[in-house]
Amino acid sequence: MITTDILVVGAGPCGLFSAFEAGLLKLHCHFIDYLPIPGGQCAELYPKKPIYDIPGFPSVLAGDLINNLMKQIEPFKPGFTLGERAETITKLDDGSFKTTTSRGTEITSKFIFIAGGLGCFAPRKPAIENLTTFEQKGVDYIVRDPEEFRGKRVVIAGGGDSALDWTLVLAELTSELTLVHRSKQFRAAPDSVQKMEALAASGKINFIADANVTGVAGNGVLQEVVITHESGEVERKAADWFVPLFGLAPQLGPIAEWGLALEKNAITVSPIDYSTSVEGIYAIGDIAEYPHKLKLILTGFHEAATACHAVHQKLNPNKKHVIKYTTVSGITPF
């Protein structure tokens, strides 16, 4: 059982900044995120995209912003449960919460911050009839730990940055790696495509273009995939793992079942402290909705700071609350 002061659901930039503001107030944060790395969309979908509206940075790459945020919160030693989705929340008798993830991890916290951006990012799954039968039994939609694939026969499907990036990484670990893509054109960085093609030319990976994975089969666990070529030819390939990487789609997901007031597929909050309709749960960033909301990262940073101070006041109702500039107070690690 993991115990923390604030559980932050979503490790995007606004969520990460919560750990800094909470740390200044001697509060500890733990994160849950379905993605295998911190950073949300900035890290997973467009790390090389320039962002122009972060104060003090005329331009900063999304990935660099996340790296800087991770360095900023490092002194406060936040915890991370990655590659898992927050599924259920139970309010305990003492007013705290127990959150259970999609993989059974249990986390107790005094407060919850929902910083899920546009919602929980769920994988776009190919239309294969019995695909879900083999989920976590040889089929997965993200790479949590590359070592899981060492010495295995792996088939990756997709043509974006994620598919190409993991092809390059796993080529060094697997006993056989096959990349299947529906065309010869890619949506990935040209450098990654060039490196993949060099691996294919040298025989280190198999590249099958103009084809789709249309079936999976096995006895309890995945044993083979069915590949259908544009020509109509069908081949069966032995496989221990099938990893379709077709991107992520935002969904409210289990959050919709947590009894929170919702509006426009977002969570209704008070613009005073960003509290939700459930005592002890706050929402910040794009997932929070209130009148005249500006959906900007800098707005989410403000919401994170305000919510942290609101939580600190609830924990210390009889203590005079004085905000000190960090230039005066400094940053004291735990």
Image (cartoon, rainbow, N blue to C red):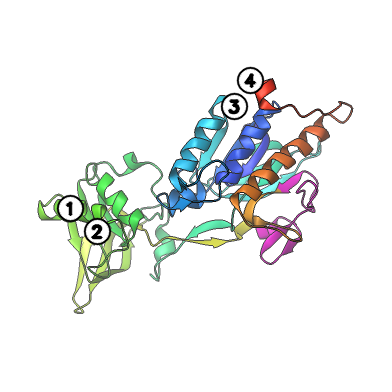
Count how many numbered circles sit on residues in the image. Answer: 4
Q: Earlier in the sequence, mark 4 or mark 1?
A: 1
In this rendering, would 33 be left or right of 273? left
CA gap between label 4 and label 3 equals 8 Å
Circle 4 SS class: loop
The residue carrying mark 4 is 332
Task: Give the residue at x 40% y 64%.
Answer: 131
> From the viewer's perspective, is residue 160 above or below residue 110?
below
In this rendering, would 223 be left or right of 283? left
The disc labelled 3 sits on which kind of residue?
Phe
In reply to whether residue 268 is colored magenta, the answer given is yes
Q: Earlier in the sequence, mark 1 or mark 3?
A: 3
In this rendering, would 133 be left or right of 4? left
Kindly report which numbered mark, 1 or 3, lies closer to the viewer in this rendering: 3
Q: Which mark is residue 179?
A: 2
The disc labelled 1 sits on which kind of residue?
Ile
The disc labelled 4 sits on which kind of residue?
Thr
The disc labelled 2 sits on which kind of residue?
Leu
Kindly report which numbered mark, 4 or 3, lies closer to the viewer in this rendering: 4
Q: Is residue 305 visible?
A: yes
> Which segment is the magenta one?
255-282
Circle 1 SS class: loop
Q: Is residue 11 visible?
A: no
Q: Residues within 10 Å of mark 1 (few under 14, many from 20)?
A: many
Q: Earlier in the sequence, mark 4 or mark 3?
A: 3
Q: Residues within 10 Å of mark 4 (few under 14, many from 20)?
A: few
Kindly report which numbered mark, 4 or 2, lies closer to the viewer in this rendering: 4
Quadrant that contains the N terminus: top right
